[in-house]
Image (spheres, rainbow, N blue to C red):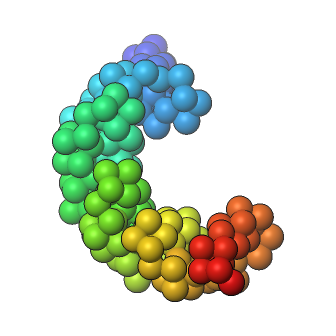
Amino acid sequence: MILWAMISCQGELARDERIVIDKCINRDGKSAPPVAIQACTELLDRNVLQGHERFYLFVNRALAYVAQGDRQHALDDYNTAVKVAPKKAQPYYYRGVFYTAQNDGAAALRDFDTVLSIDPKLVAALRQRAITYLRQKNFSGAFADFSEALRLQPKAAALWSERGYVCLLQRD
């Protein structure tokens, strides 16, 4: 009887943990930012993920902070995610996107450069860096990154359109 109760309790704990993880990840978009923040904080406090994998929780909480307009807490979490997993491309990518949204092109470019030094085939980072170059009127940089992204994903219509826009801006 005691063994069955322990197994049942473990099953309930695993189910409850899965619910909290789902709220933190907010994959379905149904968790309001405060709920996602609370869920991610709870998972961090419980040390559900260990080592460099904890960066996922910081990134997801940062995304929730951004959604509710709290840029400082978002940046703090992005910075922590980078410290927790300095050899992973994703934390730099998300922080770079954040910097782009804040019109901090220099910081965004540093992060996208780091992403691409870790994973040179990450098309999303090439695209974001190209967009950042475009905002800075660095058309050759934008063209080069859109071209590399197209080499990796030649059927991506949006990339063709964006590179074509660069050509139009250069009157080519």
Extreme residue toward the right, this view: 155
Where is residue 169? Give x, y as percent.
Answer: 60, 73
168 vs 54, nearest the viewer: 168
Q: Quadrant of the N terminus?
A: top left
Q: Is residue 44 above or below residue 123?
A: above
Q: Would residue 17 be found to the left or right of residue 146 on screen?
A: left
- Count how many numbered circles sit on residues in the image: 0
Pick the residue in front: 6 or 155.
155
Q: Position of residue 19 (x, y in %)?
A: 47, 25
- Residue at image coords 51%, 80%: 139
Q: Does residue 118 appear in this view?
A: no
Q: Quadrant of residue 172?
A: bottom right
Left of 101 or right of it: where is 41? left
Tell me residue 93's x, y (percent).
41, 63
Q: Residue at x 33, y 22 (%)?
A: 34
List the single residue furthest toward the front: 171
Q: Residue at x 33, y 65 (%)?
A: 105
Image-based side of 23 in relation to 83, left or right = right
Would residue 90 be seen by someone viewing this image from the given angle? yes
- Picture coordinates of residue 144, whole percent (x, y): 56, 85
> Hey, which quadrant is residue 117 in on the image?
bottom left
Vertical side of 118 occupied by 131: above or below: above
Say which of 16 and 143 sits in front: 143
Is residue 112 positioned above or below 42 on the image?
A: below
